[in-house]
Image (cartoon, grey):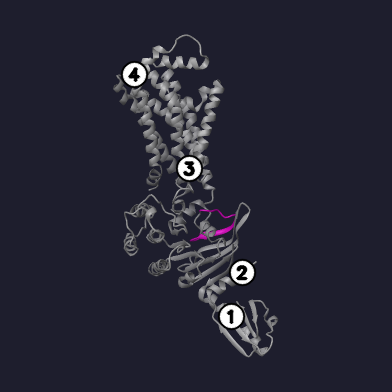
Amino acid sequence: MLWYKSWRDTRWRFLVGLGVLSLSGATVVLVYPRVLALVPLVPSSDGGGELGRRIREIAQLSREFRGYIWAQWFHQNVRQEWTVVSALLGTGGLVAQGSTGALFTLSLPVSRNRLVAVRAAAGLIELLIVALTVALLLPIMAPAVGERYAIADAVAHAICMFAAGAVFFSLACLLSTSFDDPWRPLLIVVFAAAVAGACETVFRGLQPYSVFAVMSGDVYFRTGHLPWIGIAASAGVSAALLFVATVNLARRDF
Amino acid sequence: MADAHVVQTVDLHKNYQGTEALRGLTLHVPAGSIFGFLGRNGAGKTTTIKILLGMVRPSAGRATVFGLAADDPIASVEIRRRTAFVSDEKDLYDGMTVAEMIRFTAGFFPRWRTDLEQRYLRKFELPPDRKVKALSRGMRTKLALLLSLSRGAELLVLDEPTAGLDPAMTEEVLQALVGHAAGEGMTIFFSSHQIAEVEQIADAVAIIDRGRTVVSGALDDLRESFQRVQLVFDGEPPAAAFEAPGITRVRRSGRVLTVLSTAGAEPILDRARALHAVSMDVVPVTLKEIFLESVTTEE
């Protein structure tokens, strides 16, 4: 029954996240012909500094549908949207004091560890479903613009998205055991992600170790191999955050 | 002793960031009793209840329910399996309907009583398809009671069960509780600052003040031990002659002296005869008087 409660608590956030990401992904696919038409207009000569270099790189990648999807979708849009959706799914909680029925839930014959475990498991399942759905939308939608996208690529990117998203989800879960409202955890996670993104830009040497590198499937796109170390590190961080969330909830007075 | 007392606390303390909510609370709730837990707002009633249900950890002291330690996370699950709780806010899931709330709760209790669920659904006239957030305060209380009474629990803990209800609804809720306790033989432990309702249904009480138990025992015993004696003298009443252990208050009004005692009336009457009182009356003491006396004289 806790699963049912957890689903009820998060279903709207799940559906909104699924809807927004699906719409965003579908739009990226559908505008590909127009982007392809613009690619020859991008000057090939050097100039424009770092921004010019990046525009030329994107233009180069966009000559192929797979490259375009990675550059526009996984490397760009997903970073922002997936981070927010992951954090959104992690906020709240079965006994968040701001939610209704917190004392009722605590009066049930269920341990607090189980409350966190069910909440986390339900949220992670939702996260995986969104990642897979959004990624698999690409091979489904690609024929609409006369292109093909491999299902294996979609699944591989979904795994990367899920692993990195789980970190932000777990951080939101942890913060939700300390804050009574869902907004502060969400804002803190988004702020933390923005700081991580800024560090990645400023210290370019950190880029390969960034959670965003795992999220965008950078290694997979360039080598065809899943970034197992990054995935394992993300899973480890996520598990550690959820463990701290469990400890935090266990010692809390309501 | 574990069987004789369903709930026991010994020297229970709770500090909230420098504020002492409980300061050595000792409590014994007899099995099968309807136990009224009285105290002013902020006396520590809700904190005590939350400690018993594992929602708050005590700072010091011991609290047991069914002989199980309330601060042990594993034992606490077992306590909650055998206990039903209604919070003062009647905290339920606003997004669920009455029927969903019942189905959800029943899933946690193997001894769920469908017969009682149906009986109270009819008795309380609860609309199964209505969302909890659309229920009135009274209906919400009734749903919370239904969910508690149908669990097959051995102990029912209620925190201000009639708070915010009109007199008719209060009466209905109290009657339901008394009827259920009589029929099912469960222990009811309820907090309140409504003295009249405690007096109406409780057979034992504890009065707490500033986190400490100041009076505790069977209601009849308390009424017997607390006595008010009115004495009339010919001249100035000798108030000082009645200051003694067990005398909680001596009040003089003209030639009349009113003495409130926790040690029976006989010693006062003996003393009054010796001082040639012209009239002596022993007047019954209400729970309200006991309460007011207990919470205002304690420092």
Q: In front of the other: label 1 or label 3? A: 3
Q: Secondary structure at mark 4?
A: helix
- Establish whether labels 4 and 1 are both on one chain: no
Query: Which mark is drawn over residue B228?
Result: 1
- Establish whether labels 3 and 2 are both on one chain: no
Residue A43 location in percent, x, y?
44, 11
- Please report whichever mark, 2 or 1, sits nearer to the chain's N-terminal start: 1
Question: Which image quadrant is residue B261 in?
Answer: bottom right
Which residue position holds label 4? Answer: A33
Kindly check if marks 2 and 1 are in contact, taking CB atoms under 8 A apart as contact: no
Residue B114 location in percent, x, y?
32, 59
- Give amino acid for label 1: Arg
Q: Is residue A154 magenta?
A: no
Which residue position holds label 3? Answer: A182
Q: Secondary structure at mark 1?
A: strand
- Tell me what residue is drawn at x 40 percent, y 39 percent: A13
Q: Quick one: B264 or B61, which is closer to the camera?
A: B264
Which residue position holds label 2? Answer: B296
Question: Which image quadrant is residue B265 in?
Answer: bottom right
State which region is magenta: B55-67
Q: In front of the other: label 4 or label 2? A: 4
Read off the chain for label 4: A
Instruction: Report crowding for label 1: few under 14, some 14 to 19, many 20 or more residues within 10 A (C-alpha).
Output: many
Read off the chain for label 3: A
Is the residue B250 above or below the residue B152 in the image?
below
Residue A96 location in percent, x, y?
48, 47
What is the spatial separation of the Cα atoms under label 3 and label 4, in whole angstroms? 40 Å
What is the spatial separation of the Cα atoms under label 4 and label 1, in whole angstroms? 96 Å
What is the spatial separation of the Cα atoms under label 3 and label 2, in whole angstroms? 43 Å
